[in-house]
Structure formats: C-alpha cells, structure tokens
Image (cartoon, coloured by chain):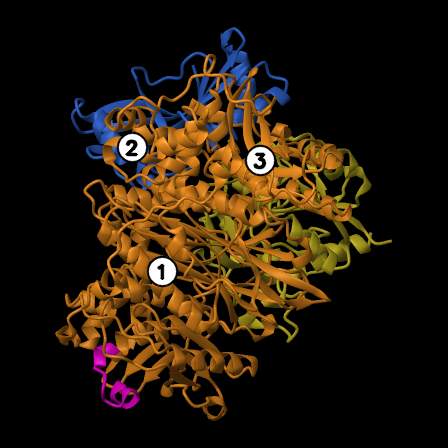
Amino acid sequence: MLSRPPSSRTLRSFRVNGLDDVELAQAAARAGLALRVDELRRIAAQLGRDPTIVEVHAFDAQWSEHCSYKSSRHHLRKLPTEGPTVMQGPAEDAGILHLGEWNGERYGVVIAHESHNHPSQVVPYEGAATGVGGIVRDVLCMGAEVIALADPLRFGRVEDSQSHARYVAQGAVDGISAYGNAIGVPNIAGDVYFDERFDDNCLVNVVALGILKENEIIHSAAPPGAAGWDIVLVGKATDRSGFGGAAFSSVTLDEADEEANKGAVQVPDPFLKNVIMRATYAVFRFLRENNVTAGFKDLGAGGIMGCTAELCSSGGYGAIVDLDDVNTAVDDLPPEVIAVGETQERLCWILPGEVTAAVLSIYNQEFSLPAIAHRACATVIGAVQNEKRYVLRFGSEIVMDVPIDLLTGTIRDELPVRPMSERKVTDPARRYVVASESVPTLLPKVFSHRDVCSREPLYVRYDGVVRGTTVIPRGHSGAGVIAPVPGCPLGVALGVAGNPRFGKVDPFLAAQYAVLCAVQKVAAVGARPLGLTDCLNFGNPQNIGHYSEFVHAIDGLSIAARALGTPYVSGNVSLYNESSAGNAIPASPIVACAGALDDVAAVVTGGFKRPGSALFLVGAPQNAAGGAVFAELLDQTGGPLPPIDFEAVNAELAFLRAAADARLILAARAIGEGGVLAATCMMAFGSMEQFAIGAQLTDPQDWTGGVVGELEAYFGEWGGFVVETAQPDVLQRIAGKGVRLTQIGRTLAERSLRLHDAWFDLRDLAVAWRSPLAQVYP
Amino acid sequence: MIPKVAVVVFPGTNSETETVRICRDVGLDAQALHWTHASRIPEFDAYVLPGGFAYEDRIRAGAVPAHDPLMDYVIDAAERGKLILGICNGAQILLEAGLVPGTGAVRRPTAAFTYNGPVPHFVCRHVYLKLAVDPQRSPITAALPADALFPAWAAHGQGRLAASDEHLREIEQGAHLAFVYAHADGRVDDAAVPNASALRCAGLVNRQGNVLAIMPHPERDAWNYNHPDRRESEDMLAPSGGVRIFAAFAKALFST
Amino acid sequence: MTMRCVAIRLKIPDNQAYTALTTLQRLNLEVARVDRAEIWVLNDAGEAADFLARVERNETLFNPNKHVLHVLEERVPREGEVWIEEMDQDDGDDLRRLGRPVAGVIGGKRYIGWRLFDDGGAAPRTTVMQAVEQLLCNPAIERAIIR
C-alpha cells in the first residue's frame, strides 16, 4: 500500500518519455537540473515511468558529483586506507584514527575534511561559515566530541582593496571566525596561499577533529534490527535556503548565474549549532548509559532525502518519510524543497521507539531548541522499513517511491584521462636558478612575499584556545597540538599542506609534497603521524587536461601515503573549480595529517630556547627550484620540483621522533615556503618576546658540499627540518644510517641573523614578515 | 563543607567545560548549570559566568542574556553578597546586567565591554593580567599578592571598556578597575592592551567587591601544557599560571 | 558633496531580528515583528546616477545575493523605528573602519535600525521607547534616535 507507484493523475511528473534529447535537455535546464539527458533516461527506464518532480530533484542531488563521486570514486580506490592506526576507514562522514590507550580505554581521533569553495565565492561569510558547520556535523555524527578545526584557504589577488578577491578573502575568514568561535572549537592549524588563478574561484577547505573512545563510535547506518525504528530529524526548521546546493557545487561558476544561484545561499546559525552540539553530547551520554545502539548522520547535500536514504540503505533497509512532519520555517514549501533543500544545522537519528521520547526531550526541553531558533526542534519524521524502497509522503499523496538502492547506489562516469607518461614534464635545462639578486636584497622580499609572510593578522581572528586544551596554538609551529582528554597525557597534532605553486608545475609531485609536508609538520612537533584526510580541489572533469591533473594527483597522493605509512581515513572531492572563462584553479590536492603524542610532555615547539645551542639541518638541500617562492621573485618559475627520496624521509622521521622522545630537541620547524632561512627566522621570531635569540649560519657551501647553489640552499623548498639542540653529540650519535644530518649553525644571544657574508637585524626582518597581511586583515 | 559553585550556562556559552575543570582542580564542587535549570541557582554558594557567545552576542554582547530569567537569580545572589566571577562573555553579561561596576541601577549599564579597537574584529592573543587594586578590595582577590600578575588569553570581539568620561572617572575613583593588561614582566603600557580598552581595563569589580568581571580567559592558560615553553614544573598536566585567580576564588569560598 | 542614505537589510533570515523579537516578547512588550537594517549615511562626492553601482561594487556593505537595499529619502527613522548609533568612536567614520572604501564616498556613519511592529502595524512610540531602554540601547556607549 505504502509503496504503490505515485499516481500520475494527481502528481506532477517530469516528462522524460516522448521527448527527444534536445527537448529533454531544455526541460532539464528550465527546471534547474544538473542531470544529463542520459541520466534522466536511465531514471525513467529504471522506474518504468516518468519520475515525479520530487523524484527528479532527489536524483539530481544524489547523482550529482558532490554526492555520488561519479567521476572520482573509482580513482579514489587507489588511495591506501588500511593500517594499524586505522580505527575506521573512509566509509562514513568521517574517519577515525587510533590515538592511543589510557586507563584501559582506546581513544580515537575522528577526522574529516570538506570544501565549501563555490558558496564562499558568492557569499563568502555565509559560505565559509556553513563550511565549518558542515564539517563539525560530520565529526559529531560519529559519536565524537569536536575538539579542533583547521582551515586551508586559497584566495585570489587581494592587493587591490576593491577587488572581489579581497572581499572573498576577508569575508571567508570572518565567516570561519564567527562560526568556529561561537561553537567553541579551537582553530589550531591551517594555511593560506594567494594566486590570481583563485580570483574567480577561491578554495575554502575545513578540517575538523573529534575525540571518542572506541566503544563510543556511532555509525551512519540504521543498525541491525532497525525495521520500524523512528527517523528523528534534529535542528533548524527547513526553509528554502540551500535548495539546489548539491547541484550548485557541481556546476562551474559563472558570474551571470550568481543571481540565479542565490537560492543556494546557505544560512549559518552557530548559536543554534552550539546548543545542538551540547544537546547531542547529552544524547550520547544517555544512549551509552542505556546501552542503546542507534544510527546518526548529518544532513548535507541532498537534505532530508539524501541523509535518510543513505542511513537506511547502508543498513540494508528502506525508509518512509512523511514530509508533513518536517518542521518547516514557512508553511508553503513545495515537497521537493523540503525533501532535498540544504538548510543548515540539521542532523538525523535512527532510534528504537522506546527511547525516542527521552531523546526528543533532551533536545526540546533540556536544551530548549524551540526557544533557540524559529521552529527548531527534534521531531519524528518517518520510519525505517524492511522493504528496500524509499518513499516520501506529502499531504495525502505519495510523492516519491523508488528502489532505495537506485537512489544511493554507485554510479560511475568514465571520462577520458591522459596517461601519466604524457603529463607535462618541465624542461630539465631550466634546472638552475640564475642568481640575479644577492641574498641581502632577496631575503626581505622572500619574507614579505604573500605566501611566506606572517599569517597572524588572519588567524588572530580565530579562537585558538577555547576548551583550554591547546598545547601549541597557531603560529608557534607548522602544526597545532592539543591535549584533548582532561587529565590524560595523550596529545593530538594537526598539520595541513598543499602548495598551489607546486600544483601548477606538476600535480603528480605536488600531491606527494602535500602528503610529505603535512606529515613533516606533524613530525616537527614531536608527534607520530597517524593518518591523513584529503580534499581534492580541481577543475572541470569534462576537460581532459583538468581531469588528468586530478587523476595524476591521486596517484601522487597514493604513492606518498604508501611510502610514509599514513593511510587516508576520510576525504572530499571538489571539482568544477574554475571561472566561466574556463580557467581552472591550480591543481590543489590539500592534505591534513593527524599525529599522536603519547605524552604531551615530549612536545617540541617552534621557537628557539637557548643561545649557544647547535642548529642542524635534517634533510638534503637540492638544486631544483620549481615552485619555490624565491624563483618566482626572480621571475624564473617553471623549473622542476625537487624529487623526494621517501626512504631517506622515513629515516629522518624516525630519527626526529626518537630525538624528541629523548628530549634532545629544543625546537624544530619543518622547512616550507622561503626555505631554510625562513624556517630559521620563524624560530627566532618565535623566541623574540621571551628570549631574544638569533642565529648564525655557516656558509651553505659547507653544508651542501658545494653541489647546491647558495640561493637554492637558503631558499629552496625541498622539505626537511631545522632543529635546535643543546646536545649535538648525542643527536649525531642517534642519527642512524640514511639520516642526512648537518650542523648549519648555532643560536645567538642577540636579535640578529648572521650569515657568512651578511648580517640582518631580526627586528627589521620581523617587520617585513609581519606587515603584508595586515593590509588585508587590519 | 566543600563550597558548591555553579558554572552558569546560557544558550551559546562555550567555555563551561574548562571552567568547571579548573574550579574542580582548585578543590571546589563545581558543576555546569544550564539555563533550563535556573531555579536551582539558590542551591549554590557561588557562581562563575563562563565565556562564550550567549545568544551569539546578538544585539550586543551580553545584552540578551542579561535579561534571561536565569539572571534574575544571579542578580539576587549578587545582592545577597554571594561571590560571582564573570569571564569574557560572563563579564560582558555582568556589565549589561548593571552588576559591574554597579554604579547604576540593575540592567541599566553604565559601561560596556564593546567592539575592540582600533579595528572592530575578534582578537585571540596571549596577555597578562595585573591586579590593579588592593587585593583586599574583593574577597575573590584577597589571597593574591599586591600587583599579582598571571597569564591569560584574550579571545573576544567585544572587550574594549567604553563609558562616558564621567563613568570612567567613577570607575577609577571607586577602585572598580580590578585588573589591567600588562606585559610578561609586569610593565603596563598600551602595547600590552589587545583591544584599546579604556583605562587599559581587563577587569572590573563592583562596589561591594563580591562581583568580579574579567575579560581575558585565565582558564585557558591554566595547566602546564598550555604553556610548554614556560614549564613551571615537569608535570605537564598540573595546573599553573591562570589557575591562581581560581585558587584565590576558592580560598575566599573556603574561608567563609 | 551629498549625503545619501541607504537602508540595507538581509533577505536571508535575520537571526538577530528574531532574537530581538523573542527577547522583547519575553520582556512583555507588545511586539509581533522586528525588522533590522543597517542604515548608512554616506558622504558622497560622486554622481547620483552611479551611486548604487558604486555601493554594490563595495560588496561588504551590500551583496545582492543576501541583501536588499533601499535609498531613504529622509534621514530620519520611520514610525515604529529606532536608529542606534555608537557614540564613543572618535571620528564617526564607520566606513573607514570597515576597511573597504566605496568609490567616490568620503566617509560614512552607520546606524542599526530596528523597526518594531505590533498586530496593528508599526509599533507606537511608547513601545519603541521601552524597547530602547530595556534592550536595544546601552546608554553608556550608544545613542538612540527615535522619530
């Protein structure tokens, strides 16, 4: 009775049968659908009839790239997802890494990564804020307490105070700040790069971490025996906002369409989210105390339909949802908007009927959701059913009735890819940079470069210390560190990486560097890298060049992660990142690495500690300067990226950890943009307030054996670490074979940087380093 | 008897967990008390209003929660001399409720912690708080030495003290200026102030001394791991630094 | 130099207006609806013809994806309305503090406009006065302008 086919007499259907391809394409465009003609025909064939309006919108969301990963999933399979640190791999909204054991409990770090690029380009404040809101729900719905945020950002040219790129750069940061601060989750890591190719398409990625005990994991599936259980919707009243959101993020941005896209503006409400999070923690406690297994998932792309269908189908069930029972903000919403609209701040439980009333009471009475936001509440909207159909009721009618697996099953687009052997290879003749400037003139320029200079004016707007768990806040090292469990010595480190300048040179190697740099940032604070999450930001997959970059980057991510033994437990794909002129963004595989400190007492911070201690370089300088900031400043871009010797890297990572555990390291920093000199000076800046320690470096000829040019040695971005130690002999003794360890200088009891042929006042360098971004973020 | 402290949670509060934790670390029987349990307020010996964004700072920081029914009980407790400590958003609420500096009527504020200057955006910066009144001015600070200095984090968008010249004079002359911002070495100058606050104010106390409002968060630099470069002992999990204000608060409660 | 006055409202749901409404109702004021707008009084050296285009290009003041803009003929609050201004800023130039200039505009002053309605339409002056005194204005730092 419930699953009878919708009556075509009373319901508007979307006509597929009887239209030719041109007519069908026009009809789809008029209806605002992103579904292609072949997909529409497949839906009609599988259903044996024309779909209803609600059904066609449901498939439009579910079969969008955003939900279905139709052109990426089969490539993502190449990524390593298993290993001893994996508590849960990438099957649900977030993955879980094994942090460590304490008091007989196994603790897991939940990690998820998401992009909110397209919305942030149009309405940066709301777009970025809802990005934070979404990723927080992904972590929350695993049963975890949300403990940290990080935000990799890519913006366009911000120098012109009137530019849209500047508006986006300011608005997105304000949105992240407003949302993350209000919900009370510290922002502990992130990066930002600026490039003209992000003018029309910024990247706003967000990473969130959660903490739980292994026996507290809640899955995003209806549990065994769930037939007849309640489907409970929690949160904001459903409104028109975000209708068409899933399809929106899968369509190339076009300036002229911005107005038409405004239905896709998602409205953040961090105040409501703050309360929902705390109420949900109370529900977690209630369910644990009563030994109740439940299913839990956040509402994202595809709205109520997408969430309930995936919850039930992944448990092997069907669902019936009554749209009349959904709390809506206004009374006249059409069923397709209620079903697939992407109103923020909503979650969905699958609960056995006997606990439903108690859970509703926690949300609605104890935490008074209806008093927090207009018509917000927790309410029963449907039931899990054995029959594997997905049914929506509205009014007295059934407006959707389809096989649930057709809706949520895998679909795949085979798109043409160029073989790896045909990828652009840089002319090896351009290997050496011509030193057209001296180090003294180049150094301040490198420091004030928009991708090297201090990020403090930006991250000072984020609360980095709420919860009182922060060990290393932003700016003190490449990675942030927290001690998330009160009274427990376990520490969690988080670092992100993904250099778009490298992405322009070679997406394959750039992806390897994204992994390497994220891992190195985590290793530099003394943590053991546990695993990764990735966000793949690329252009239009229908363009073979852009799609090939994407596929080659996945190969690079795979190679590096396998070599370093760091599996992926979650990730996100964002395609169609380009302007209407068809200019894609630089290939942007962005990687976050979570690390573990068995004892936060072993943490290594980034600022110099003592004058007269020894400075070591871990890693080998290389001549390759492709993608390096100094090469760009010398107008000599396009050289090859330095190759990576993973065997040596592994030896160095093991050495660093052993040295940190033995408390031999006073300070350490991973070498990134601006090379050894930038890393060294940031370590000095980190000590300036308290200790006023500078550095003296020897002639780079001595530490490179003369085979690497001076500029490449000082400014090259070939990885490695700068390490401060008071026990150079012990450090050298524990460095095993294969560890490239070279003393490059020592620290000084003065605010200077002394090179073999030059001297700098660190205060001058600090001004050059600190001022540029203060223009954009006053 | 171990004093019972309610850490008062409004919708939008976000610092209740660490505030409860530090209160327990100094020996108090602390618990988070949610807005839906307002009527339990009289059970407690003292109150901490923690940080966050109660009602998301809508209209003005502290304005809406100052009118929450929960505050009726807190205002009553203040008038009966119970100790009340407001931190960050809690401080903003105490000002909007007129309890601090307390130079006007209830819910008719005479000062505000308002948008930071010179640029009105959120600032998260490590700071030092310096006691600017005689420790005996308030029971909450009585156990601190004169000129006590301890670390904290400023983390607010609206932390700049602003008031009319007349009210600022009242604050100074009435010894309401409990804390000022300082450098690590105790020096006080404008560079130490993260928000252009009038009088370099970081904290205010009411006339009776039982209600203290401090803008930065001492509870976020309150354990050794919060400042790994300045270890005060080798036990990274031990309380230190900002815990001192809570220890003084606890001492006041144990001695009454 | 011409003073031009615009009111900019969110066309997406305005959470602040919602909270103002529920709080005023809790304070037993007879209010059925609250509208909130940013009122900008801009000191414009440019042409009237392209004024709106210049404001729109600023984006921070006005983004058509989320805002609606009205040019106000009169620089005074309407019936049922109060404008709140910050008193304690020295120069009174809120546009400069915004850090994003509008081409041709020398400076600007910002007010928050709250308009209250009861079941019969714009709320009477006494209701607005009560709302100002009890919630909408902190007299230590703000000034309320009522018609």
Q: Which residue is mark 1?
A: A554
Say if B76 sits above or below A2 in the image.
below
Say if B16 sits above or below A677 in the image.
above
Is there any visible trace of residue A609 in the rendered image?
no
The part of the chain drawn in magenta is A700-712
Q: Residue at x 44, y 76 (%)?
A: A668
Which chain is blue in the picture?
C
Q: Secondary structure at mark 1?
A: helix
Is there any visible trace of residue A599 in the rendered image?
yes
Q: Which dot marks residue A388?
A: 3
Q: Nearer the viewer, residue A122 or A40?
A: A40
Letter of the chain that mark 3 sits on in the rendering: A
Which chain is orange in the picture?
A
* Residue A319 placement (x, y as % from top left): 59, 33
Is residue B213 shown left or right of residue A164?
right
Badge 1 amino acid: Ile
* Residue A376 placement (x, y as % from top left): 59, 29
Q: Which mark is first along the chain, 3 or 2?
A: 2
10 Å neighbourhood of mark 1: few (<14), some, or many (≥20)?
many
Which chain is yellow in the picture?
B
Q: Which mark is first along the chain, 1 or 3?
A: 3
**Badge nearest the viewer, 2 or 1:** 1
Q: Nearer the viewer, residue A18 or A729?
A: A18
Q: Secondary structure at mark 3?
A: loop
Badge 3 amino acid: Lys
Letter of the chain that mark 1 sits on in the rendering: A
* Residue A717 placement (x, y as % from top left): 29, 72
Q: Which dot marks residue A258?
A: 2
**Badge nearest the viewer, 2 or 3:** 3
